Amino acid sequence: MTTAVLGAGISGLSAAYYLLRRFGKPLTIYEASPRVGGWIRTECHKDKGFYFEGGAHTIRPQGVAGANTLELVEQLKLEVKPIAKTHVAARNRLLYAKGKLCMLPNSIGGLLGVKEPFTQPLYKALLHDLRAAVTKVKDADESIYSFVERRFGKELADYAISPMICGICAGDAREISVRFLMEELFEKEQKYGGVLKGVLYARFKAKTDAQLGMGIFAEQQPQLYAKACAEKWAMYGLEGGLEQLPRALRSYLAEQRINVQLSSRAQSLSFDSAGANISLRNAEQPAGHVISSLPAHQLALLVRAQHPSLAAQLLAIPYVDVIVINLQYNSDKLLQLDGFGLLVPPVEQLPILGIIFDSCCFDMSGNTVLTVMMGGRWFANWFAHQPSQKELRDIAQRYVAKILNISEEPKFSRVHTLQKCIPQYTVGHKRRVESIRNYIANYKLPLSVCGAAFDGVGINDVILSARRQVDLLPPQSA
């Protein structure tokens, strides 16, 4: 019987890729929209030498997850555009705080002096961690803000960690789980009595742990990963933009005659002793096993009739809306400071989350290209009145002018409102995910779940999530 994959975003396509490699056919992918790629979307303007990214902009090569993606990129023969750690986009990270642009420290020396927006040298925050008592946390989880404030002080929580969480998941650090996003640091503090103590004590285990993680690779580390390590890449893009990755996966699957049904939204999903049954608009499709890469709230609607308790657990994972505004200017001399971009701490109470300097990261043929991110956890605060695309563009341009002193009109722009695009890993999220997967296991449902809601928000995370769920399947499941 056919294995079915729900969703043709990057996690669903990756699941199909790994299913094909492990089990072969038959295999079918059902995607509700008329395209593959999910939130990864690249708009190329080859005649003018620039492109817009509507979702993720770069990929990091670090760790097992980074190595896994590089192996996939290598197998698909995609051309990478590396950014070395010495590149200005890797070294320079900016904040807009207290009415001015501030450069975050990018060296050990930067910890010694006072750098705005901080009012004391950052080494004092490290001393705070060494002196602070350990608090045994109830239910073994707390918010990232609470954790950082306890260990390093309020300033670091407000002006370093909170904007970083905006950049990762457009979320509020006061709500996001430290156990999910910073589990290693949290466990080191709980075990060794401090973050720095734990890092120093565990440093000799790091190499062994990393080698154990690399066991997912059959023979050796991917060659492209070895190259990234040797050349000290901080991040990378793809020639033609990141949408080349889902497009290449789709092409590979098509070559293997894998059925990718676009504009095929599942209406419900039920299970019986024979497997699963997917209700589509005009058909009922049986499947031996289903891998869902759908957002948790979408999967909840499919299973709620037969499994209301599972649906309730899935709906307990909140999502946020993000507005992405791409702006292009016919000059590459507009930015006064180069870098990856800037983040805005939530304490500033502004409608924008940050601005990415795309044309600092990659060559845009004499253009300045910026991406303004707005909304996220604070979407309802600023945009509940459903402003028009022009109003949203005007807001973005107003803050580009205010923060970056770019007052001229962009020559080209694009506005996207991405509804329920990023899951929020609120306190208790790890236990929530374990409960969902335990429910599936206890009821012996022929169902696997992968993707951003369960295993992390980045491209690396969702691809590795798909691979690990496929690896957990017994041979008879496919």
Image (spheres, rainbow, N blue to C red):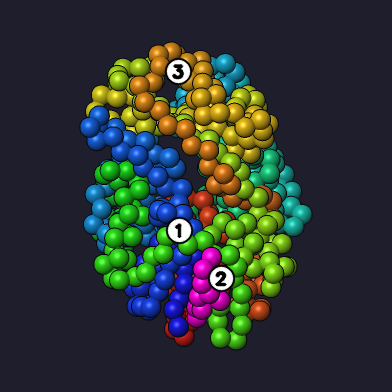
Residue under label 3: 404
Splitting the image into 4 quarters, where does residue 368 fall? top left
| Dot 1 and dot 3 residues touching (CB under 8 Å) | no
Residue 24 in view: yes
Percent x, y of residue 45:
28, 34
The residues tagged by marks 2 and 1 sit, at their Cα atoms, a distance apart of 14 Å
Which corner quadrant holds the C terminus? bottom left
Residue type marked 1 = Ser
Percent x, y of residue 197:
58, 48
Percent x, y of residue 431:
67, 61
Splitting the image into 4 quarters, where does residue 321 fall? top right
Q: Which residues are magenta?
A: 277-291
Identify the residue shown where x is 31% and y is 50%: 244
Residue under label 2: 279
Residue under label 1: 263
Residue 360 in view: no
Query: In terms of depth relative to the viewer, which is nearer, 111 or 62?
Result: 62
Label 1 Cα crowd, 10 Å radius (few <14 / some 14-19 / many 20+): few
